[in-house]
Amino acid sequence: MGTPYDEQLAAKQARCHAALGTSALPTALDTTPLDPGPLWEPPFASNPERFRNKAKLVVGGTRDSPTVGILDRGGEGIDLRHCGLYEPGLTEVVQQVPEIIADLGLVPYAVPHRSGELKHVLVTHSPAGELMVRFVLRSPGQVGRIERALPELQERLPGARVVSVNLQPTHAAVLEGPEEMVLTRDQELPMQVNDVRLRLRTRSFFQTNTLVAAGLYRQARDWINDVDPASLWDLYCGVGGFALHALMRPDGTPRDVLGVEVSPEAVESARTAAAELPGKPTFLAGDVTDHLTTTPPPDLVVVNPPRRGIGADLAGWLESSGVEHVLYSSCNVDSLAADLARMPSLLPVRARLFDMFPQTNHLEVLTLLRRR
């Protein structure tokens, strides 16, 4: 923070070039016999502030005067309700959260003393102004208090479509626990991204920057349509962002699309969203490596792994599979570079930086690989 935004973008672009083995921008006219590296598109910039669609608020302070933000080194709350990260609409909600906590009578969890109940409040904001609000408690004792206050809470936050309680009983730096109780009739938060209405459940992953996520999915669809595969797998598909954007071919016919994701909740969300679109994609819950030998490989594979990358097993399968194209969306250029080294038969031909996380060193890079 404090670095001019154009300098931030330039530094991230240089880091991507270095990680993918290129120090300069090759052009479409490059005719050198050696691999020139990928053809880089201009970086997709973010708003440098007010870009986050999700607030992960650590609750501190006291019952009468709670704080929301982070904890200091001693475990005491630092209030960040006026933080400049949150997108318009979410900003106003975050500023109301401390008063709502106090009115509910919820006691903030005190890390130094291991006492209290409310650990976190997690708020997700959709492009339509709707909200998912999750209260993370240490024990179920205060669930009834939130449940009884639900009508008032939805009156104060008119966009609160999904309200839930998560139980995180352990004294550990863990954001949420394994048990979730949805208190509202609606279980999912619709997220309109381009012409696709994705659906988020309480445990579903979604990119924190809606504007840049929309650009990422549009670019992916354009590159997929350029090579026009008849069949496609979306591995680590989450709620189906890549798969659902790539359902239809340029001639209007549907592709044979399979999405695989370890989270059953995310798979259910993807299936619900797919029901509103043409085509009939298949979404399966499970580890991606369990599905590699069950059917013949597709024409194109999309991978969007966590920071650790796809790893040796999946990279080895892609290398030997005969798949013609791989579209790799990475939030860690170092693990991306390691995975590319494991797939020497797949050449990076196009790439683009997406600044999903301004004011940090983190980034997202989309790379199209083509078999040599």
Image (tube, rainbow, N blue to C red):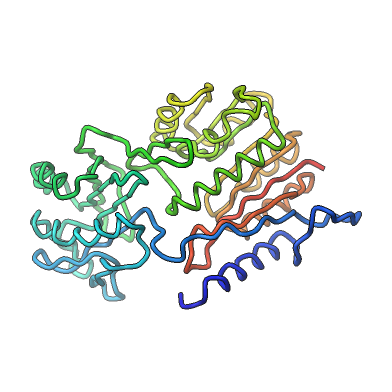
Residue 183 x %, y %: 19, 38
Instruction: Name the residue: 23% across, 72% down.
Output: 76
Residue 62 x %, y %: 13, 67
In the image, 326 versus 294, the foreground residue is 326
Q: Quadrant of residue 315?
A: top right
In the image, 6 versus 325, the foreground residue is 6
Please state the total of marks drawn on the protein image.
Answer: 0
Q: Viewed as shown, does residue 31 lie left or right of 252?
A: right
Task: Identify whether 11 is placed above or below 153.
Answer: below
Instruction: Name the residue: 11% across, 41% down.
Output: 151
Instruction: Name the residue: 32% across, 42% down.
Output: 202
In the image, 159 versus 232, the foreground residue is 159
Residue 220 x %, y %: 61, 43
Residue 243 x %, y %: 54, 34
Instruction: Name the residue: 50% across, 57% down.
Output: 356
Which corner quadrant holds the C terminus?
top right
